[in-house]
Amino acid sequence: MMEEFELGTPALVCRWRLAARTLPLENRHLRALSQRHVAGKAVSTGLVAWAKQHIEWTLAEGAADQPDGVLMLVMDERGRAAMTVGPYEELPDRSLAELADRALAARREAAVTGVSPESLWVVRNGALVWGAEPDELASGAASLVVDLAHTLGISVERAPRLADAARAGEVALDEALLVSDEHGPVAADGLGGPVAERLARGYATLLERAARRPLGA
């Protein structure tokens, strides 16, 4: 699925989880892609259309060796793009400190591209708290979790410095999880609970449904 040219320095790398050679969150990921920026310019509608076309026309064949892998979209500073598929690997470290560090790194990425691919969330007094700015745009996975929470009757609020506070051990919480375009909702070690489990189950069900759907349907 790689394009027939050599990319320059990567300016944007999206990593999206596959299931049975399909992209379960395709529409959400493409919507978030359209809100990103590369080299100070918004991702063009033409690039989004190109990505959608490649997903629909070549993903099934391109993911044959890694049907449950990761679809990677890479763009350079000139706006040229390529797509490829690689293996999926679970997070080796799920400590709260590591998940907070990943969220902080993603936030630095968002300062350039406009969308954070990973974010830290906590459960406090039965409500979900999302480590995001008041007007921050949601990634594909984050938008799914917001919708799942609303379906489950769980309120969602935002806290911009949540990852910093969690990293410093200065946040009150009942549960903690990372929400990632690549990994979905992932509970921190020792900080899982009913809300994180329900979100993870909802995400897993989505992957399972995609796996049962005939290719091209």
Image (cartoon, helix red, strand yellow):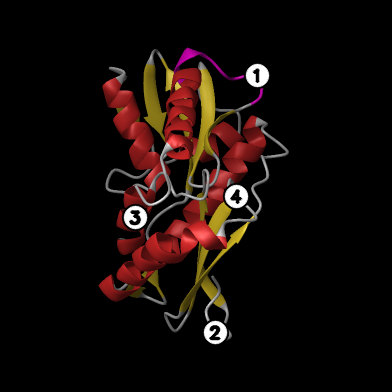
Q: Which residue is mark 1?
A: 190
Amino acid type of the residue that numbered disc 2 sits on in the rendered structure: Glu
- Please rate how many residues cluster around mark 4, counting C-alpha atoms within 10 Å: few if below 14, some from 14 to 19, many from 20: many
Earlier residue among tags 1 and 4: 4
Residue 167 location (% of width, % of height)? 60, 36
Instruction: Give me the C-alpha separation between circle 2 and circle 1.
Output: 46 Å
**Residue 7 magenta:** no
Instruction: Give me the C-alpha separation between circle 1 and circle 4.
Output: 27 Å
Q: Which mark is residue 141?
A: none
Q: Which residue is mark 4?
A: 69
Earlier residue among tags 4 and 3: 3
Q: In this rendering, which labeled residue sits more in front, label 1 or label 3?
A: 3
Relative vertical location of residue 83 with respect to residue 214 in this rendering, above or below = below
Instruction: Give me the C-alpha separation between circle 1 and circle 3.
Output: 31 Å
Residue 50 location (% of width, % of height)? 36, 72
Amino acid type of the residue that numbered disc 3 sits on in the rendered structure: Ala
Q: Which residue is mark 3?
A: 32
Q: Which residues are magenta?
A: 189-195
Which residue occupies 38% across, 14% down? 126
